Image (tube, rainbow, N blue to C red):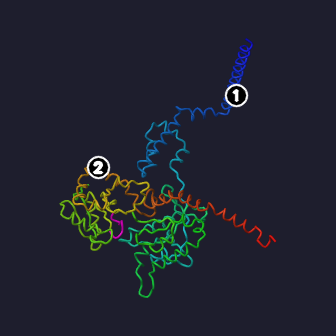
Amino acid sequence: MAEKKAMALEMVSRKSLFCLFALTSFLFLLSWFFVLRSTGLTRFIDQNLLPNSKPLSLIDNINSTRTTQNSVEPSKRNRGILVNSEVGEEEETSEISDDVKCDINNKEPLKVFMYDLPPEFHFGLLGWKGEGKNVWPDIQTKIPAYPGGLNLQHSIEYWLTLDLLTSEFLDIPKARSAIRVRNSSEADVMFVPFFSSLSYNRYSKVNPHRKKSMNKELQDKLVKYLTAQKEWKRSGGRDHIVLAHHPNSMLSARMKLWPAMLILADFGSRPTLLYFQGAIYRKDGGLARQELFYLLKDEKDVHFSFGSVQKDGIRKATEGMQSSKFCLNIAGDTPSSNRLFDAIASHCIPVVISDDIELPYEDVLDYSQFCIFVRTSDALKEKYLINLIRSIGKDEWTQMWQKLKEVEQFFEFQYPSKEDDAVQMIWQAVARKVPAINMKVHKSRRFLRSISRQDRLLRTLPTPSNFW
């Protein structure tokens, strides 16, 4: 009996303690509620933390929109968010704060340190001669012209350099994906302004009075210069951007400048079904051209013929692409050519037959949405390619054609550059690689301090002669 009474008393005491604790907690929370109310913070809690509040639901809307846009169309991410904000009720859109809008639309531009290389590496190749110690032309007064024709397909070096020079005096916030900084310690990446494609096109032949070409000499000078710079030594070159857009440019320097980041090329009424005009007999990977010629030359709605840039050839090729549904892009002496980008500009669906082609911005652009890719081995099977093209119906072609028009701007170079044009897309592609570069640089430094400490320790240890 005594034991039962003791157990009952113990249970009562526990219940009493629990009730006392609960009452104390309630009074504590109540007191804080009155303090918050007196300071006006309860209104903030009611408006921003309760599940049914409008600002929270709108922010959720925007976040879900951002997720959707990231998986669908890179070209319309910011645009899609704005459209979704404006489509809702007026009273709701008016409540989105300016801070939220800034977070959605504003991104920090890529900070780029550009080496002040002598003019012989860049605008000097265009015939520009600086006065005194001037390294760069005054582009606010006159911009040195870049040569036309086939040179233009590998002119990225020129446009990116102009864009960085412009960033110091021309403020276009919406189009500015990269800015030049003068202090390399503040930069995300280091930019090497060498017009390597132009150097290859103009100066790759050896002059009879010289042992090696001017193009080779410039590459040797560049390697010697870069590898001696503190910026290169600091990262081992991992954060450096080297331009080698022409497939044959920088061939002697590429491996010597490893592991730098190389920017390469390897990337109505339409009565004609399939179009190709160009050099048919090529070497190496381009041997497929002549085999395809014999497979397709007799197809009634296929244009497959020899052509060149001479005698109005460019105009005729442009007109042919603009009047065709599909345009062949076949590997030549190199995996890619400007024909792919001409097709995009002509809104002609590219049919890519090149197993080794590299394409620009492929980490954000899904080329399969507006291009047809065919393995070379398949394309050379009799009737395989033409049957594949004929199997694509009007609706599928129209979808690809619409997508082609949307991405066209990403391949256009212009000065000054504009939002989402080729210059800005390249800078954005570089920016996406910065985190990986930083990780590699940091990993490379793991044991540097340990080695330094070991060296100091060895220097402080007594030599064997000191033991006796």
Q: Is residue 334 magenta?
A: yes
Q: Are marks 1 and 2 in contact (CB under 8 Å)?
A: no
According to the picture, the residue beneath numbered tag 1 turns out to be 28
Amino acid bearing label 2 = Glu
- Is residue 168 something that shows in the picture? no
Graded by Cα atoms within 10 Å as few (under 14), some (14 to 19) or many (20 or more), the crowding at tag 2 reads few
Q: Residue at x 55, y 75 (%)?
A: 225
According to the picture, the residue beneath numbered tag 2 turns out to be 396
Which of the two residues, 426 or 299, is positioned nearer the viewer here? 299
Outermost residue to the top: 1
Q: Position of residue 2 (x, y in %)?
A: 75, 13
Q: Secondary structure at mark 1?
A: helix
Amino acid bearing label 1 = Phe
Q: Position of residue 62 (x, y in %)?
A: 48, 42
Magenta: predominant secondary structure element? loop
Q: What is the spatial separation of the Cα atoms under label 1 and label 2, in whole angstroms?
A: 66 Å
- Is residue 119 something that shows in the picture? yes
Q: Position of residue 315 (x, y in %)?
A: 28, 67
Which of the two residues, 447 or 264, is positioned nearer the viewer here? 447
**Which quadrant is home to the N terminus?**
top right
Q: Which residues are magenta?
A: 332-339
Q: Secondary structure at mark 2?
A: helix
Q: Residue at x 36, y 71 (%)?
A: 150
Q: Residue at x 57, y 63 (%)?
A: 181
Query: Does residue 200 appear left or right of residue 283 in this picture?
Result: right
Outermost residue to the bottom: 209
Query: Does residue 36 appear left or right of residue 195 in this picture?
Result: right
